Image (cartoon, rainbow, N blue to C red):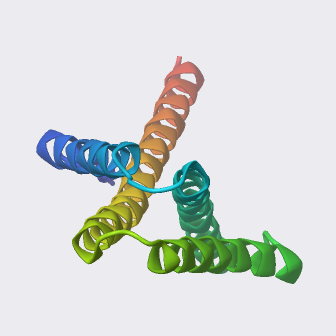
Amino acid sequence: MQTLIHRDSKPWQVQVWASFLIAVFLCAVGLSYLPGKDLDRAFMVMGYFFCLSAAFVLAKYVRDQEQSRAEGRLVDTPMFKLVVWGGFFLAMSLTGWGLWRMEVNETYKAFLGVSWLYLITCSFTLAKTLRDRHEADLSEARLAGRASRSNIASE
């Protein structure tokens, strides 16, 4: 029996990384030229980082839950679920609220909003791609371990 290990193609990986880096660049440009008060700028930078880290945590949590359901075991507690989902919605809500209430040009707000949402969607895709690579590496290592054990046993 042949075991199939799925790996993302190199062009897909390049596209995912390029999209993520473009999103980071657009957010950095938008935030660095943000007119207005330093406090608004600091709030938005913190909000973007909060959203970015919350998106990666949420992506890992959802993937872990799906894997644990498939294996029939419980990985995380209901309180951790609340913390993960609550943190993500809090980060997104507070950042959106901060962006909405800022006293800047509507076109500038639109640029910041679109680049922020682009960053969040790219972070989910990047998290999935990295996790897929990790799982493929683990599968290959397991196969190599089995092959070496069967070679030793047959000698």
Q: Residue at x 28, y 77 (%)?
A: 106
The x, y position of residue 91, in whole percent, is 62, 70
**Res. 101 in view:** yes
Q: Nearer the viewer, residue 30 or 19?
A: 30
The x, y position of residue 32, in whole percent, is 38, 42
**Res. 73 in view:** no
Count numbered badges in the picture.
0
Q: Residue at x 53, y 65 (%)?
A: 59
Q: Is 151 left, or right, of 25 in this rendering?
A: right
On screen, residue 110 above or below 37: below
Q: Is 65 left, or right, of 102 in this rendering?
A: right
Q: Is 83 left, or right, of 95 in this rendering?
A: right
The x, y position of residue 140, in whole percent, is 43, 38
Q: Residue at x 47, y 51 (%)?
A: 131
Q: Residue at x 67, y 72 (%)?
A: 68
Snapshot quadrant of residue 110: bottom left
